[in-house]
Image (spheres, rainbow, N blue to C red):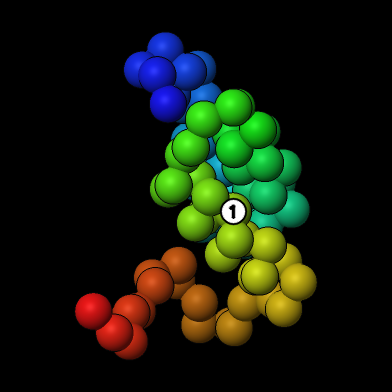
């Protein structure tokens, strides 16, 4: 992804992060979908989009704080 293309998605990505951590997963999915629609790879946006889609579909536990605990290295 070129620098200019990445910078053009920054406001949407920041809005998506705010929505994600505020449990507004539908808004996060919408914003992140726009970020990954730019014709270049954006792995962080793709990963967060997948997490937001899962949480939107399955819901978040009451004690969810947005922290992702990895089980393997």
Quadrant for the N terminus in the image: top left
Q: Is residue 25 above or below residue 59?
A: above
Category of crowding for the residue at label 1, using alpha-carbon neighbours closer than 10 angstroms: few (below 14), some (14–19), many (at least 20): many
Please state which of residues 71 and 1 is positioned toward the viewer in this rendering. Answer: 1
The residue that appears at 36% across and 17% down in the rendered structure is 3
Q: Which residue is mark 1?
A: 49
The answer, for residue 22, to whether it is visible in the render is no
| Quadrant in the picture for residue 51 | bottom right
Label 1 element class: helix
**Is 45 on the left or on the right of 67, as rendered?**
right
Residue 50 seen in the figure? yes
Q: Position of residue 24 (x, y in %)?
A: 67, 55
Residue at x 45%, y 67% (from the top left corner): 66
Q: Image point 59% across, 38% down: which residue? A: 36
User: Relative to 57, does residue 17 appear above or below in the rendering?
Assistant: above
Q: Report x, y in % for residue 40.
A: 52, 30
Relative to 27, residue 9 above or below: above
Say left or right for 61 vs 1. Answer: right
Depth order, front residue of 7/65: 7
| In the displayed structure image, the side of residue 4 where residue 49 appears, left or right | right
> Which residue appears at 44% of the width and 47% of the height?
43
In which quadrant will I find the C terminus?
bottom left
Quarter holding residue 35: top right
Residue pushed farthest bottom? 71
| Residue located farthest toward the top when viewing the structure as drawn | 4
- Image coordinates of residue 15 in percent, x first then y, are 55, 36
54 shown above or below 7: below
22 to the left or right of 67:
right
């Amino acid at each position: 992804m070129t620098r200019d293309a990445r910078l053009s998605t920054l406001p949407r990505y920041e809005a998506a992060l705010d929505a994600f951590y505020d449990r507004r997963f539908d808004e996060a999915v919408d914003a992140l979908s726009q970020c990954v629609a730019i014709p270049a790879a954006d792995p962080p946006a793709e990963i967060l989009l997948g997490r937001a889609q899962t949480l939107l579909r399955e819901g978040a536990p009451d004690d969810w704080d947005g922290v992702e605990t990895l089980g393997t290295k």
